[in-house]
Amino acid sequence: MNPLVNDLIYYVSAIVAVIFVFAPHEFAHAYIAYKCGDPTAKMRGRMTLNPLKHIDIYGFLACILVGFGWAKPVPINPYNFKHYRRGMFFTSIAGVTANYIIAFFAYPLFLLVEIYMPVSTVAGYYLYSFLELTFRNIFVFSLGVFMFNLLPFNPLDGFRIVQAATREVNPVQRFLRNYGQYILIAVVLESFLCGILESYAHLPIARYFNILGYVQWFALNILGYPIQLVWNLIFRLGIPGINPYGVLISV
């Protein structure tokens, strides 16, 4: 098959997948914040599934290229919450919870396409490839965004959880608030460089220094394992294995 067409199919499927990952994530933040007493996100038009309201171009591209990314943070005013700590906590975990639910339902759709979709023509093959890649990417990106956002660096959701669990004068919270974004940028750049060294400089040893590579491995092979186990048993595919070297979906 034409490799250019295959590449085009992959990137289109990745764009579709990122939309299905980010829009519900940010909507969940806005909706739970509203339910906890803060209407800020709703008033600013962020309590919507319209992806154009949520997409950050750099986070969008990062997710397509490396499986991790971010959207525009939903504005909240935690002092509007009926219960400050409870509101902060539930608002913080709302996005990643939505992502895990999406991953749970994306995987069986991937299996349905992988196992049962007939391929008898070239057009059928391209449709098959698009649907398979789209549902696979939704599964992979959802779990990647889930794990990435739980890192405790400002402005990620993990830092908001730290805020909910500690006081503002806490030195750990203060450090993460002031320097978390710089640590995050350094980690992303380090992992991106390791990926380049492994893929283009043919230095496989760089894999072992890729910090976000370990995060992604944990997301797919540990957090994603229960999802694969449940649906593989339902589809009678047996128990999935854990890949020690990379990211694979067992079918």
Image (cartoon, rainbow, N blue to C red):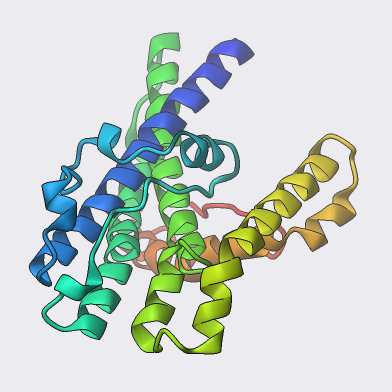
Q: Nearer the viewer, residue 172 or 15?
A: 172
Picture quadrant where residue 76 is located? bottom left
How far across and down, in percent of the image, does residue 158 sit?
Answer: 44, 71
Position of 119 relative to 92 (above/below): above
With 27 as the anchor, is 144 left or right in this view? right
Residue at 41% x, 84% y is 168
Residue at 52% x, 34% y is 61
Position of 209 relative to 113 (above/below): below
Quadrant position of the N terminus in the picture: top right
Picture quadrant where residue 132 is located? top left
With 248 as the anchor, is 142 left or right in this view? left
Q: Is residue 104 in sight in this rendering?
A: yes
Residue at 20% x, 74% y is 79
How far across and down, in percent of the image, does residue 189 sit?
Answer: 71, 49
Q: Nearer the viewer, residue 227 or 188?
A: 188
Residue at 51% x, 42% y is 63
How far across and down, in percent of the image, does residue 150 sit?
Answer: 46, 69
What count of labels does the image hold? 0
Position of 244 relative to 169 (above/below): above
Position of 115 relative to 2 (above/below): below
Q: Is residue 243 in sight in this rendering?
A: no
How far across and down, in percent of the image, does residue 128 sit?
Answer: 40, 26
Q: Nearer the viewer, residue 118 or 169?
A: 169
